[in-house]
Amino acid sequence: MNILPERYWQRFDLWKDTTQEEWENWRWQIKNRIKSIDILESLFFLDRQKREAFKKVSPVYHIGTTPYYLSLIKNPDYKDPVFRQIFPSYEEIDPDIQEKGFFDPFNEESSPIEGITHRYPDRVLFRITSFCSVYCRHCMRKRNFIYGERSKTKKEIIRMIEYVKNNRKIKEVLISGGDPLTLPNQKLDFILKNIQNINHIDIIRIGSREPVVNPFRFYDENLLKIFERYDKIWIVTHFNHPDEITQETKKAVKNILSTGTPVLNQTVLLKGINDNIEIIEKLMRSLLKVKIKPYYLFFCDPTKGVLHFRTDIKKGIEIMDYLRGRVSGLGIPTYAVDLPEGKGKVPLLPNYAVEIDSDKTVFRSYKGEKVITDIKWG
């Protein structure tokens, strides 16, 4: 866990007079997002390459970060995992790198109702805002950066909810964006109340990066009361590196869990950030320490502006193979790839059944040993 010194933000001149009360106010964090190169240069030395990258990328894709998330940067360099997720690089708009990418690789915009993706029979995705506290450089909905920042209107949300009411096969609603937990409590409460009251809905899953980039959102007692009120809610967050897990994270998660709301995590495998067996092992262990259950490890999506983060697909299998036997089953996510054109997610696993006969099966243990058994197939 990344244990930061008390009032660590005051090492930056920009926030030297910021009080702890201000710093720990989630609205203050959003209001004071850093979006300009001038402010970034007042915080860090940026060489010509970085300044040029910012100048060329910012007209195409949004740039913005909370002061809290920026404060986790140890070195203002692309080798720093937090810096690399915040700061643009020319690779995002390099046509030679991005030519095979898609703005909407999974046909999410092909919706029965504006704002809804209905890919699986029992689940729908609500895209209720295009706003985020931090614009991650690897975002799979990078097209939102181009369309601008807005949330769905009450009228639009009611249409989405009516769609779910009229489809009894739907058992689960995933609320995403942008980041839905950047919405005001009143609007969030309206959405959750109406979905909670649909009898055939079992689960409301909220996808949010706020526990990573603005954990003070969960210091808000009014938000916690909302979670407590609606018992169908699950939170799925998005930590990619152990440096993102702090004492503030621990407090935020503890507050969420106190409402009876489970917390899961999905990680994206990202070149130059976490494509390393030791880093992923440390991340999984760090998540468990703060009581977040690792859920998915995703192969990076073929999104335009993101392809430079893609690893070889075998890298994820190598990592999963390494984790087995070294990390508790609680800490092993499902490695998955999202298929093009909305065909759905499929898991990718190391092969442990190395020989299958009619009278026996030979397995490979996590240590690489061959184990002959009398297990039969068929």
Image (spheres, rainbow, N blue to C red):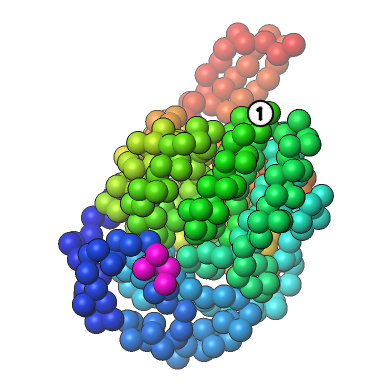
- x and y, in percent, of residue 121 in the image: 76, 35
Per the rendered image, the range of residues in magenta is 27-31
Residue furthest toward the left?
6
The reply to whether residue 200 is visible in this rendering is yes
Nearest to the observer: residue 217 or residue 375: 217
Nearest to the observer: residue 68 or residue 325: 68
- x and y, in percent, of residue 16 in the image: 21, 77
185 vs 64: above or below: above
What residue appears at the point 21 percent right and 77 percent down from the top-left corner? 17
What residue appears at the point 57 percent right and 41 percent down from the top-left corner? 193
Quadrant of the drawing holding the C terminus: top right
The quadrant where residue 344 appears: top right
189 vs 94: above or below: above
Can residue 93 be found in the magenta stretch? no
- x and y, in percent, of residue 90 in the image: 57, 80
What residue appears at the point 65 percent right and 23 percent down from the top-left corner? 355
Which residue position is annotated with label 1?
199
- Left or right of 295 on screen, residue 8: left
- Left or right of 350 on screen, residue 34: left
- x and y, in percent, of residue 28 in the image: 36, 68
Nearest to the observer: residue 78 or residue 345: 345
Task: Inspect the image, locate mark 1, and give the three-letter code of the amino acid beneath it.
Answer: Asn
The reply to whether residue 72 is visible in this rendering is no
The quadrant where residue 227 appears: top left
